[in-house]
Amino acid sequence: MSLGDGISQTLVERKEKFDVNRNIRFGLLGFCIIGPTLRTWYGILDRRINIQASKLGTAVAKMAVDQGLFAPIFIANFLGINSFIQGNSLSQMKNDITKNFTDVVISNYKLWPAVQLISFSVVPLQYRVLFVQSVAVFWNTYLSWKTNLGESEGPVDSEALAA
């Protein structure tokens, strides 16, 4: 997550001064909350969803539960926690969730269903978080940019963000 934030600050937002505190907060959020949560979630999916007749069917079922149930809840929690660690009030946290939730969920659905199908059908459980977080460098760049729009000091490079 720190790498994604670093890419956002330097290449997308083109900040004149790198915000080390923001980068540390984003990294700690990933290390303390996101990584452990995803590892636990993938373990639950692996234990609970198994369609004996079809490996692809199992992957599709896991992806559907992951994206239909977990993703929206996880995104709302991420937005709230990120706002909280930025030092915002409860009212501002609610505003941040309301302002960003729909855009982030829509963007999530453009990327993660395909990634999760690959993850659940090919990648062994013990490597799933590593695989997903490799893709998530780009996702985290987007999340960092999206959740820090008001702080940008320079012009946003939309080509860098799209890449």
Image: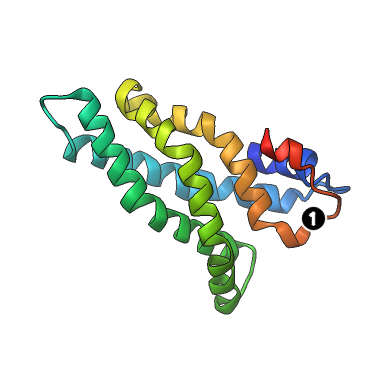
Location of residue 151 (image quadrant): bottom right
Location of residue 43 (image quadrant): top left
Mark 1 residue type: Ser
Q: Position of residue 8 (x, y in %)?
A: 71, 43
Residue drawn where x is 39% and y is 58% of the image? 73
* Location of mark 1 (residue): 152
Q: Is residue 121 placed above or below 71 in the rendered structure?
A: above
Instruction: Specify the quadrant that holds the N terminus.
Output: top right
Q: Is residue 51 placed above or below 8 in the rendered structure?
A: above
Apparent side of residue 156 relative to residue 46 in the rendered image (left or right): right
Badge 1: how crowded within 10 Å, few (<14), some, or many (20+)?
Answer: some
In terms of secondary structure, where does tag 1 sit?
A: loop
Q: Position of residue 63 (x, y in %)?
A: 32, 38
Q: Which residue ends up furthest to the left in the rendered image?
A: 52
Return the residue nearer the eye: 5 or 68. 68
Residue drawn where x is 16% and y is 33% of the image? 50
Q: Position of residue 12 (x, y in %)?
A: 76, 42
Report whether residue 1 is seen: no
Q: Position of residue 124 (x, y in %)?
A: 32, 22
Report whether residue 12 is seen: yes
Instruction: Specify the quadrant that holds the C terminus.
Output: top right
Residue drawn where x is 32% and y is 29% of the image? 120
Q: Which residue ends up furthest to the bottom in the rendered image?
A: 91
Apparent side of residue 151 relative to residue 43 in the rendered image (left or right): right
